[in-house]
Amino acid sequence: MDIFYFFFHLGLQLLKANGKLSFITTNYYLTSDGGENLRTDFKNSATVNGLINLNELRIFESAKGQHNLITFLTKGVNDTSLSHNLVTSETGDCNQELFDKVISEQNENSKIYTVPQSELYETTNNYIRLQGLGNKENSSKDNSIFNKIIKQGTPLIEICDISQGILSGVDRISNKHIESELTEKENINHGVYVLTNDEVKNKKLSKQELELIRPWFKNSDIHKYWTSDDSKYKVIYATRDLEIKDYPTIKKHFEKFEAVIKNRSQERGEMQAAVKLGKWWVIFAARTKSVFECEKIVCPQRTKTNVFGYNTDIWYSSADVYYITNAKKGTNLKFILALLNSKLYFFWLYNKGKRKGESLELYYTPLTEIPVKKISLTEQQPFIDLVEKIINKKGVSTSELEKKIDQLVYKLYDITPAEQKIIEEK
């Protein structure tokens, strides 16, 4: 949740009936989990007059990573009022001339949508859809595709488990730790929980201590259909069930960075319980070990396209990676993998998932909501066979095999040639 949400709530409380409110904020609240209460407040207490989504057009020089939105509201619900929404595909730094053209609707790279209040909000989460649910441009095209996926699908969370990677609380020493005087300057970039292979080697850990060391991968190690298996880092998987005295070298390592480790947030119940036991050194959010050591699909939480990798390795990573595991009986993970990497599912994720600018945000909630059609294992086999061929070609061009998967997915959902053209063009 962002602090600016409270300014919206308070503004609506303070305004008189029919009073106007407008803010420039980030655009994340439109679909974020934390923005649900705000969207509900809009729906129940206000009329949306207009939304200008600037996406990757940067209007603040000091906020390079932001994707901004201008929101115009009136206090009180008027179901007959239309919201005049604008979405621009302009990118880069914005100057006054360009900004004026965009907001005055004179920019060829911007689209205008006039949306009834009833068609702004989608699902019980009240996601705000700038184009509207019944937009004429989409109703006979895009929406027919979405409906085919939804009507034939079961939410992914009902078929598989979905988990986030590990939060250590402090992977490595950063400038922030030095500036806060929590450790010495010579420790900059030194591993605390996440160590380089050389750092691990130099510690000369005992056989027992090496049992706590796990391979550590980054989200950049995830590729479409496969993952890297060469880890440049290791993580010390220190959990609450350990007696640290049995691991003297690791104990000494943690004590060296005790001030840094104790400076982590302790809001999580599991951390509070560990600290009460004197186990201040535990990893902040260890998750369940089996998630990292079983058959799995992994994806980066932010990516330009749908990238889902597969492995059966011991594969630990940070919280910017999500894990899809434990497919229910009758479903093969490689079938799920084929769907998730297809062009049809990119179309779904781009339009119905969460985005930051043009990047997909593959967080827990949008992953759980992905519809998957249930078919028999026999029917899944053609998908599985193609996926296995792609995985075996690791790193070699597999575009022809991927095209075959796309065609299988289109056929699975009865996507017509005309609808395929819409998907391919977008």
Image (cartoon, rainbow, N blue to C red):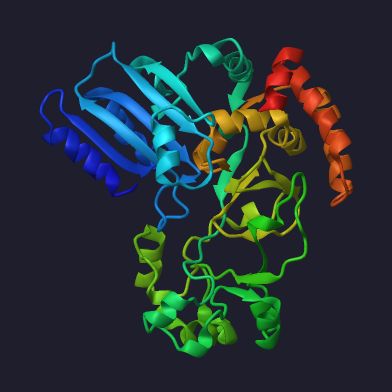
Find residue 180 and report its horizontal and vertical position in percent.
Answer: 36, 80
Residue at image x 49%, y 70%?
170
| Relative to 387, 26 lies left or right | left
Count of numbered tags:
0
| Frontmost residue, 243 versus 155 | 155
| Frontmost residue, 217 versus 396 | 396
- Quadrant location of residue 211? bottom right
Residue 189 appears in view: yes
Find residue 121 and report its horizontal and vertical position in percent.
Answer: 39, 23
Residue 30 appears in view: no
| Frontmost residue, 80 versus 338 | 80
Find residue 200 and report its horizontal and vertical position in percent.
Answer: 67, 80
Q: Quadrant of the C terminus?
A: top right
| Relative to 183, 151 lies left or right | right
Residue at image x 61%, y 28%?
348
Residue at the outermost front position: 97
- Quadrant location of residue 17? top left
Residue at image x 57%, y 55%?
165
| Relative to 349, 275 lies left or right | left
Find residue 405 and report its horizontal and vertical position in percent.
Answer: 81, 30
The answer to whether residue 357 is above or below residue 228 is above
The answer to whether residue 421 is above or below residue 293 is above
